[in-house]
Amino acid sequence: MRVRVDRARCRGYGICTSIEPTVFALDDDGYATTDDHTLSPAEVESVRRAAKLCPERAISTDEP
Amino acid sequence: MLTERRFTTILLPDGAAVDELVSIDDRWVAARVMTDPDLYGLELARIFDRVWVFVGHETEIPNPGDFVTRYIGADPVIVARSADGDVHVTLNVCSHRGATVCRVECGNAATFRCPYHAWVYDNTGELLGIFAERDAYGDGLDKGTLSLKRARTTAYHGLIFATWNPDAPSLADHFSTMDFYYRIVFGLTDGGFEVAGPPLRWVENTNWKFAAENLSGDGYHLMNVHKFLDELGLIPGWSDPTMARGVTSVYDRRTGDGLQMAHFFPIDTSDLEAAMVTSTTLFGLTETFVPEIMRRLSADQLAVFAKGISAAGTIFPTLSYTALPWPTGDPAEGFSFMRALRLAQPLGPDRHVVWTWPLLARDLPGEEKERQRRTTLRSFGTAGLVEQDDAEVWSANQRGIAGVQGRQRRFRYDASRPVNPDWPGPGVARTAFPDEDNQLNFWARWLELMTA
């Protein structure tokens, strides 16, 4: 599974980075980024949770 | 007894002392307790901020993420079930600038976002994220200290109560006396009860205490205010005072709770098993519930239940309930059952919001559930005939004491009966024509909280 952050939607709550810091990071201005790596099984669950809790629905995955 | 208590003297702006507004010994209550804005403000702080308050039924929020918004006094709260299944009650007030965070009345959500500056909380009250946190606050804020304020929360026979008071006794201790009765009313089946749907709600132009104290034990008005039940032939004999001589009133001095039980349809209990079939059916359940009721109730509880009961009461301060064999209104259908919760949420000194939840035994056959739902709604809630009767009279009370002369009057509670020494249950019980002892006990608890 892969994850994307819609940078145009992100409004800098930092919820995703607090849930899964190995997948999400904040840039210098405090908005979320992610690299494009294939998620480990352990990361999949926390990324789903981050996607669910993102107030702007800015996180998407290529698998439901 | 209350006369032994020591009061703190609190003076109202005109010099009247709060502890002189009620006389338990002389059995009267000053009418201004129903009209005074300063007393209303004191009630919010001294009663609603200190006691367990009903905020909802567990079956309103069955799934993780489900929530409803409610009130403790005038404070808005979110009642939510978190992912782990626990129920949380949090102050619906943003830790940033005080806006109500959640502005809808029910739904399912993992997070709540404040409409003002978009701070985001989870359904346990934790502050999850702050909008543009780095732009706004640089290195950020200590979010752990900025949760929504959390209330102590406990579910009891499906009823969810919450309190802000860290020193309040546990709910189990609080209800240790009255559980004898609440188990009969709310906890006698394995499957429990469920709400029929979202609560009905309307505003009544009366002080909340007219409803709460009445439902704690005013059996006296029933024969008069609701005499249509007799006049229309729905409950023959209802308005005949001699029919009301066997009503048992019980109160708990400690909590202020009171209820009345009547044996309108007395059952011979010499054969307990046979009596249980009749009393269970009379109590809105089916014969299949008998084994679990006999397992769940003690011998003393069964002695009360098996005689066939109707029950109604108030859990202080604002939650009332009815559990009564009741006419459907359709002569072909005859009797069914009316089981409802009724909350008198204060909305100022002369208004309250009435919330009504019909309660149905979860394991009841669907057809009987529907019959009970309709029976309950015909009597309680927005279209309830019994409710309209009461609202009409209590509005007359409120109008009657709105003037300068009216608000200087005293309400009387002189009717008293001897305590029933043979009653098998706890609390202070009387079995006779309806008394005014229960209501006076409501006022004793009110006075204690307002002055102690």
Image (spheres, rainbow, N blue to C red):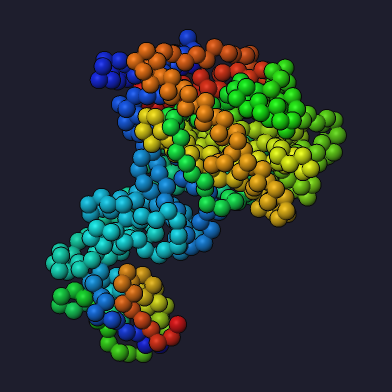
Residue at position x 33%, y 79% from top? A59
Residue B429 visible to an observer of this rendering:
no
* Quarter of the picture holding the C terminus of chain B: top left
Residue B184, percent across and down? Answer: 66, 38
Residue A27 visible to an observer of this rendering:
yes
Residue B89, percent across and down? Answer: 41, 50
Q: Is residue B380 above or below residue B210?
A: below
Residue at position x 28%, y 74% from top? A17
Question: Which residue in the rendered view is the most extreme toward the top?
Answer: B26
User: Viewer-proximal residue, B55 or B420?
Assistant: B55
Residue B188, percent across and down? Answer: 67, 44
Would residue B172 appear left or right of B77 to someone viewing this image?
right
Q: Is residue B160 above or below residue B385?
A: below
User: Viewer-proximal residue, B74 or B440?
Assistant: B74
- Location of residue A21 by image quarter: bottom left
User: Viewer-proximal residue, B141 or B114?
Assistant: B114
Residue B235, percent across and down? Answer: 73, 30
Count of marks placed on residues: 0
Question: Which residue in the rendered view is the most extreme toward the front?
Answer: B232
Residue at position x 59%, y 45% from top? B358
- Location of residue B334 by image quarter: top right
Would residue A12 appear left or right of B439 to someone viewing this image?
left
Would residue B358 appear left or right of B98 to someone viewing this image?
right
Would residue B228 appear left or right of B96 to someone viewing this image?
right
Residue at position x 27%, y 83% from top? A34
Q: Is residue B11 above or below residue B365?
A: above
